[in-house]
Image: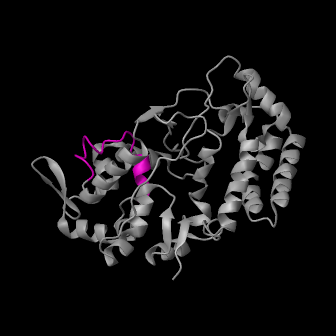
């Protein structure tokens, strides 16, 4: 069975990460104190043509941007993908069956990729990501009950229940610390889909309602964590972030453009960028690919991009702007 050099998971996740080799963030410094959306740059065209070349030369799975997760996972289980691009935990989970059936094989973390505009010794630029927002809708028939549920989930008891399950059934307290019952630890560890855990009511989304993360304080550390997995994750971090991380504190132009008067009319056009890029990498010729990009650029200009990016630059004048950011 032929091996595909590079592949990923559903709908191209995350083989497109190579964009960081061409431009450093979603908005690019023009060198005159202003920014431009990366979609309008030469670097974006180079990025597009590079991926077209990968497909043409058989280096990238031609189904990478159209396949579903089940199809992608089947390829991985069959050992048909040599290099996987995705979050490392997803790679660990998806490759577990293949590695188990083929002793001595493994997916080894490599990297980091060169980043456009970044020095080799630069720490990884990461953005702070917030938590979900919880609301009680107007349709709620018992607001008091909803509030009681939120209060319970935000308590230590609720925190433990959402993450660990039922005390006495899934875990016990030993010497003041929660300890997983071996029966359930083994069941959860053997299940690569996560369905067994969800069927027990654990990790079904309620943990996002439990407030401040107390996994290493009240909960004593993740009792379901596979120690080999933790070690593999730490090893991956040391490879992918050899110079550590730097939390971004600068202004993101993307947060400003959505406040422009033109945003409502512009947003539908900007939402098409990803779809048009995929059409471009599969187009018959390079000329056709660039034509697709330019057609959308024209549509964005007609729906207010020029005025919107002017709004951005006026509001960010003299401020520190995000110029480098690792994809999520």
Q: Position of residue 128 (x, y in %)?
A: 50, 36
Query: Which residue shows up at 87% across the image and 47% down it?
Result: 299
Would residue 226 be seen by someone viewing this image from the given angle? Answer: no
Q: Position of residue 256 (x, y in %)?
A: 69, 31
Image height check: is 315 above or below 257? above
The boundaries of the magenta stretch are 204-222
Q: Residue furthest top?
A: 318
Q: Is residue 211 left or right of residue 185?
A: right
**Is residue 41 on the magenta stretch?**
no
Q: Is residue 141 left or right of residue 98?
A: right
Q: Residue furthest bottom?
A: 1
Image height check: is 36 above or below 199? above
Query: Which residue shows up at 22% across the image and 58% down it?
Result: 167
Image quadrant of residue 323?
Answer: top right
Q: Nearer the viewer, residue 325 or 41?
A: 41
Q: Position of residue 7 (x, y in %)?
A: 55, 65
Query: Which residue shows up at 21% across the image and 65% down it?
Result: 169
Q: Residue furthest front?
A: 57
Image quadrant of residue 194?
Answer: bottom left
**Is residue 209 on the magenta stretch?**
yes
Q: Nearer the viewer, residue 153 or 8?
A: 8
């Amino acid at each position: 069975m032929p091996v595909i050099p590079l592949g990923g998971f559903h709908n191209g996740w995350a083989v497109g990460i190579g964009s960081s080799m061409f431009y450093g963030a979603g908005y690019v410094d023009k060198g005159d104190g202003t920014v431009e959306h990366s979609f309008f740059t030469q670097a974006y065209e180079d990025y597009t043509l590079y991926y077209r070349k990968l497909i043409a030369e058989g280096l990238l799975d031609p189904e990478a941007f159209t396949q579903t997760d089940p199809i992608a996972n089947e390829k991985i289980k069959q050992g048909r993908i040599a290099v996987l691009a995705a979050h490392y935990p997803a790679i660990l989970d998806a490759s577990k069956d293949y590695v188990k059936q083929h002793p001595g094989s493994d997916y080894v973390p490599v990297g980091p990729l060169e980043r456009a505009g970044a020095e080799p010794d630069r720490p990884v630029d990461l953005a702070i990501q917030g938590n979900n927002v919880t609301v009680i809708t107007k349709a709620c028939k018992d607001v008091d009950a909803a509030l009681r549920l939120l209060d319970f989930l935000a308590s230590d008891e609720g925190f433990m229940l959402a993450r660990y399950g039922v005390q006495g059934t899934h875990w016990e307290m030993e010497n003041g610390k929660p300890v997983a019952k071996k029966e359930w630890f083994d069941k959860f560890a053997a299940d690569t889909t996560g369905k067994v855990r969800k069927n027990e009511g654990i990790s079904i989304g309620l943990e996002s309602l439990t407030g401040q993360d107390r996994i290493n304080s009240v909960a004593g550390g993740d009792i379901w964590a596979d120690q080999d997995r933790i070690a593999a994750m730490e090893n991956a971090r040391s490879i992918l972030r050899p110079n550590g991380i730097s939390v971004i504190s600068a202004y993101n132009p993307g947060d400003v453009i959505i406040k422009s008067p033109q945003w409502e009319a512009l947003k539908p056009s900007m939402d098409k960028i990803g779809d048009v890029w995929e059409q471009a990498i599969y187009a018959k010729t390079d000329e056709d690919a660039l034509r697709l990009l330019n057609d959308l650029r024209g549509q964005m200009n007609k729906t207010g991009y020029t005025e919107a990016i002017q709004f951005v630059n006026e509001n960010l004048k003299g401020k520190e702007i995000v110029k480098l950011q690792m994809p999520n």
